[in-house]
Amino acid sequence: MRGKVLAGALAATVGLLGTLEGVKLYPYLDVGGVPTVCMGSTHDVEWRPYTAQECSEKALAEVQVYWDGVLAKAPPETPGSVLGAMTSVAYNTGVRGWAVESGRDSRFVIALRNKDWVAACAAITAPWQGRYGVSQGYKATVGGKPHKGLENRRAAEYNFCMEDLR
């Protein structure tokens, strides 16, 4: 049964990322100047048009990597919506960026270890001190400045995270 729950949560996570990232068949530079394509993929981006099928395959393969990174730190009973939201944050910040802060376990990892699902969700939109201001969301900065688009993303991730907790 747990496998079906995880498969459903993974599918919902891909849907969330599709909503947050959109699908772009042509490579572009994101707000941080990083080459990006498909559903926000920054890995092995080739400067050529991609097909919808290529983007789907790329997204599924990449999301699985982030999902596995989150699962490695999450207790087995972690609700699906929490896993999905954590995966979305990790997709945006990298698994290490999601799991580690200042050389220690991140607020997410600590909350998950303590099985405090609400705290894990709340950490998504907690204030984040950038070099040039405080953003409303985990690493919701670009070049050290708060970024409204990333703050909006963190708010959507928080809402997704809370779905199984309501």
Image (spheres, rainbow, N blue to C red):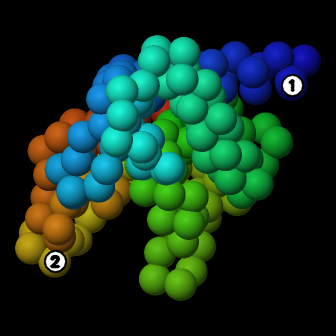
Residue 2 marker:
1
Q: Residues within 10 Å of mark 1 (few under 14, many from 20)?
A: few
Tell me, yes or no, if residue 55 can be seen here: yes
Q: In percent of the image, x 12 and y 65: which residue is there?
A: 145
Nearest to N terminus: mark 2 or mark 1:
1
* Residue 110 located left or right of residue 153: right
Residue type at the position of mark 2: Arg
State whether residue 162 appears in this view: no
Which residue was labeled with disc 2? 131
* In the image, farthest residue toward the right: 1
Q: CA distance from mark 2 to mark 1?
A: 42 Å
> Image point 31% across, 50% down: which residue?
35
Looking at numbered disc 1 in the image, what kind of residue is underneath it? Arg
- 27 vs 5: above or below: below
Q: Nearer the viewer, residue 44 or 62?
A: 44
Q: Give x and y (percent) for residue 91.
A: 49, 46
